[in-house]
């Protein structure tokens, strides 16, 4: 009897809330977004119907309805959250995806879900566009960065990247006629894929991973805090340029569980030995596997993903090594891209081994990926010794950190 009364109470509360929704002419949605609960009120006038058939007419009529609704309250809430938590565009897009999912679940109707993503993006100021190809709704956004591995179209000397490529695994979206894209003239902002700040996740949402490696006949152990949400953030993240890639940071809890310990471990070492320690940590504390075998395609992992993943390759280790050296020593560095490999070189007061000269400065190679040889600072694998390379990123610190 008590159980029945409790269930009935919940049902009555639900019915009361439903009635309240009807009275206020809208719906309240609430969901967890990283470190907070995100609450939003959506006017019933913003709720467009599902399409009987996908057509340009459906998109335009849905836009007219949504544009005449009280959408501003939704967009203002989204933009206020973006500003408060300093979300980069990519993370803001994840918030928009979650909001569109709350308003119109993806499994319920993909076309209406995509419409809401587009509508919220354009009303946030981004030059986002929709088009229809082979009875599929395709979602583009203006982006002027060097992005690889996702389709794009050029229109009036502007590049538009496909934001829903992952939903059409085998479609050739590069052949979509760009002149048929539906746009909103006042939405002009470019979208950026740069991630320069990670969210502050709830501390309780982290797991711990034990990492160990041997240096100088001593075994060093680390219990690194990692958040599974990071993998979801970057699930559909494209291959960005090396500058953007190398500057993706760790989240706060992961940083606090690793960087202070590494700083402490190298505090009594001279600079060269400390860099060697970080190089060998990156090389031997993690298991290696090629991306083709691990993911079936090229995939660059952020430093936190590399720590989380069971396997990682040379791109991932180069980015992690760069991040560790930048945070602990803040020395100038360059990334050297070979046809089948990438490695790092660090600028010391005096070069070590065979120097790399770039823009009048000398750098010493620090190989963070396991090789057949046990390479020291200043040494390159014999297989790459006479192979041409390209410097794809050069880091010059604004203020050097002194670590003794």
Image: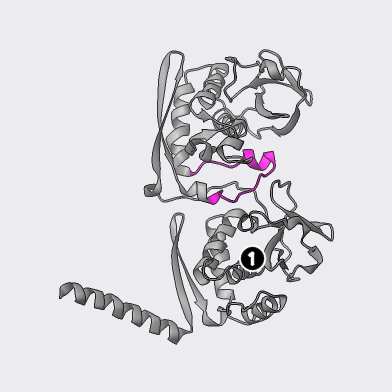
Q: Which residue is mark 1?
A: 121
Q: Examine the rendered structure and indicate whether residue 395 appears above or below residue 266.
A: below
Instruction: Answer few, some or many: residues within 10 Å of disc 1's Cα (few below 14, many 20 plus, some between 14 and 19).
Output: many
Residue 156 position within the rendered picture, expressed as x and y whole percent measured from the top left? 84, 61
Quadrant in the picture for residue 49: bottom right
**Quadrant occupied by the N terminus:** bottom left
Q: From the viewer's perspective, is 62 left or right of 20? A: right
Question: Horizontal and vertical percent for residue 86?
Answer: 56, 54
| Above or below 212: residue 244 | below
What segment carries the magenta color?
233-251
Residue shown at 45% from the left, 50% from the top: 201
Report if residue 350 is visible in the image. Answer: no
Q: Main secondary structure of the magenta part?
A: loop
Name the residue furthest bottom: 23
Q: Is residue 250 magenta?
A: yes
Query: Looking at this view, is 130 or 192 the one in front?
Result: 130
- Local SS, label 1: helix
């Amino acid at each position: 009897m008590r159980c029945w009364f409790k269930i009935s109470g919940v049902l009555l509360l639900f019915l009361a809330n439903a009635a309240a929704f009807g009275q206020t002419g809208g719906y309240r949605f609430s969901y967890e977004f990283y470190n907070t609960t995100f609450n939003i009120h959506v006017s019933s006038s913003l709720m467009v119907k599902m399409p009987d058939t996908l057509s340009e007419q459906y998109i335009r009529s849905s836009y007219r309805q949504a544009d005449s609704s009280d959408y501003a309250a939704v967009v203002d809430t989204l933009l206020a959250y973006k500003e408060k938590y300093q979300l980069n565009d990519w993370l803001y897009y994840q918030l928009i995806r979650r909001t569109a999912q709350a308003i119109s679940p993806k499994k319920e109707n993909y076309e209406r879900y995509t419409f809401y993503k587009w509508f919220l993006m354009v009303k946030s100021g981004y030059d986002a566009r929709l088009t229809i190809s082979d009875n599929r709704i395709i979602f583009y956004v203006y982006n002027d960065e060097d992005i690889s591995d996702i389709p794009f179209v050029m229109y009036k000397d502007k590049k538009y990247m496909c934001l829903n490529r992952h939903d059409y695994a085998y479609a050739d979206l590069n052949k979509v006629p760009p002149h048929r894209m539906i746009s909103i003239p006042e939405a002009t902002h470019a979208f950026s894929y740069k991630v320069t700040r990670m969210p502050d996740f709830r501390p309780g949402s982290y797991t711990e991973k034990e990492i160990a490696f041997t240096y100088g006949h001593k075994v060093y152990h680390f219990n690194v805090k990692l958040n599974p949400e990071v993998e979801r953030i970057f699930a559909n993240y494209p291959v960005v340029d090396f500058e953007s890639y190398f500057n993706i940071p760790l989240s706060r809890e992961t940083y606090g569980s690793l960087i202070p310990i590494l700083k402490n471990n190298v505090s009594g070492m001279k600079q060269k030995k400390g860099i060697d320690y970080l190089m060998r940590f990156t090389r031997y504390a993690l298991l290696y596997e090629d991306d083709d075998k691990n993911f079936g395609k090229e995939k660059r992992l952020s430093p936190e993903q590399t720590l989380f993943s069971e396997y990682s390759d040379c791109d991932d280790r180069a980015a992690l090594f760069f991040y560790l050296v930048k945070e602990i020593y803040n020395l100038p560095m360059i990334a050297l891209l070979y046809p089948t490999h990438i490695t790092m070189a660090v600028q010391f007061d005096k070069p070590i081994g065979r120097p790399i000269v770039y823009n009048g400065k000398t750098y010493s190679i620090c190989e963070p990926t396991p090789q057949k040889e046990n390479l020291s600072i200043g040494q390159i694998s014999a297989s790459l010794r006479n192979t041409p390379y390209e410097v794809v990123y050069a880091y010059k610190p604004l203020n050097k950190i002194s670590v003794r």
